[in-house]
Image (tube, helix red, strand yellow):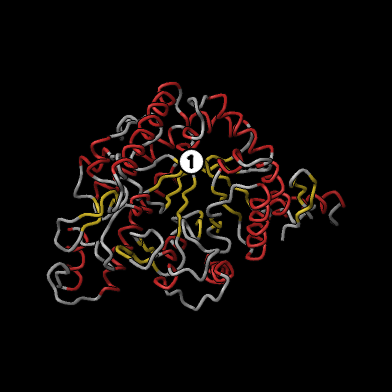
Amino acid sequence: MRPTIAFVLFFIATSAAAARPELIVDIDFNDEVIIRPEPITAAEVEQLVRDLHAQGTQTLLLRMGYLGYLPYRTKLGYPIGFDAEHARRHPFSRNLDSKKLEQFIESRQRDNARYRKVIETFNPPEVFIRVGHELGMKVVLWIDIFDDGYSGHRSKFIDEHPHCQWTARDGKTRFEGLISYAWPESRAFRLAQAKELLDLGADGIHCSTSAHCRHLPNVQEDDFYGFEEPVVAEYRNRYGVDIRTAADFDKEAWHTVKGEFMNRLYRELAEVCHRRGKEFWVGLQLGEYTHLAADPYFGKNVVARYRNLWQDLVDQKIADAFIVGDYEICSTPDHAYWKAKALKPEPGDDLFAWAAGYYQPHCKGKTKLYLFGEWLPGSTEALDTRLAFWAAKVLAGEFDGIDLHEAMNFEKTPRGMELLGRMRQRLDGKEVPPLRVESQGSRVESQAP
């Protein structure tokens, strides 16, 4: 029996829809509060979701952790607030004068007082999930697994479990705010958080490697951290060597042990998600390692690292999606940051092409690959040009979509939502006309690449 023309057209249409790159916009709710002079309302949240949907956004990625506090109704974290004395004891810069520090404290106290009123009025993820689902959007909740401390900001979990942080060889010095998942207590904390968020109706959980604590003053010695007791014990059991006291040991084996503990966290979180039919996503830095460079954030001082055992996450059906280049500067391949990475094979001048060739063969048809859209510019013309760049990289690398960071850019930039709609058209392979912009009172055209 020959297929009808209608069937053939339907098959073509559904195949095209399935291949359509996914447009994901992430929402840092913390910024949504800060950019407004008055507490954000549930109605404003609803309008934001509707605006994003109207421009072709299919998935929302909502940040549910930041600097150690949890921006929703939960007993896992402290009520939103700011500890001025903590900020004075732990300034966010080495050479910060007292006037600038006090200005920072005053600003954060004001912002967080407004933030607290928001949480008292409504529970943000509930509104995002409800409205997103009404519009047929997917809403994935984003956890920053390493972002648990900053000047004036404290994590309830770390206060109660200070040992659960990346630790130096002396067994005492800690990377403040950087949770180590070698400890079962740390993994249990994240599982509890994931269950709370899934209970609200989230479509999945995403783990990002964003870490504001890396901006804080730190040591500048490679591999200074990663000597937590469970890591030390596991290495000793396997190789008969105490890495805290040995003059020399196999660092590559050590990085692998740390990577295995990270995969244990991911496996446990994935089980929670998959039992409910929900997705589990992982933020994946490029290459063999996740590097936690600190002081500066993007530098060559790799004070902590672990091996990316990403193939296991694919083969064991743990990760449903990777956001590749997670919180990295892949659009700047000549930056000093990449010298410490030492990617293999040599990536050349296009890290996106490198990523496509490196990950696609193993992930195709098993784990989706999304690009991370980095930090977007604030002017209309620059933003449109940048979005054209990202659309080209998604299509050229045959990635499954892109996570644009972040919604605030499209709210604050003039015509920002229109530009997001143009991005959707580009991802759909449509020709987008030149952007018409105002320049010194006359109308000019700007050709986006």
Q: Where is residue 122 in the image (x, y as percent from the top left)?
A: 46, 23
In the image, residue 130 above or below residue 25:
above
Q: SS at mark 1?
A: loop
Residue at 37% over, 63% down: 291
Number of numbered markers: 1
Quadrant of residue 421 within the rendered picture: top right
Furthest-left residue in this view: 245
Give 95 or 2, whichever is nearer the viewer.
95
Kind of residue sitting beneath label 1: Asp
Furthest-right residue in this view: 5
In the drawing, does residue 137 fall left or right of residue 8?
left
Give 166 or 445, whichever is nearer the viewer.
445
Q: Position of residue 378 (x, y in %)?
A: 59, 47
Residue at 39% over, 34% down: 107
Furthest-top residue in this view: 121
Residue at 59% over, 53% down: 402
Give 197 or 227, whichever is nearer the viewer.
227
Which quadrant, please, contains the C terminus? bottom right
Quadrant of residue 249 within the rendered picture: bottom left
In the image, residue 95 above or below residue 39:
below
Which quadrant, please, contains the N terminus? bottom right
Q: Position of residue 59 (x, y in %)?
A: 58, 43
Quadrant of residue 301 within the rendered picture: bottom left
Q: Where is residue 94 in the image (x, y as percent from the top left)?
A: 28, 53
Query: Would you call the spot at circle 1 few (<14 residues within 10 Å), some (14-19), or many (20 or more)?
Result: many
In the image, residue 308 above or below residue 148:
below
In the drawing, does residue 105 fall left or right of residue 438?
left
Residue bearing mark 1: 28
In the drawing, does residue 13 fall left or right of residue 24?
right
Residue at 48% over, 68% down: 335
Give 180 or 435, whichever is nearer the viewer.
435
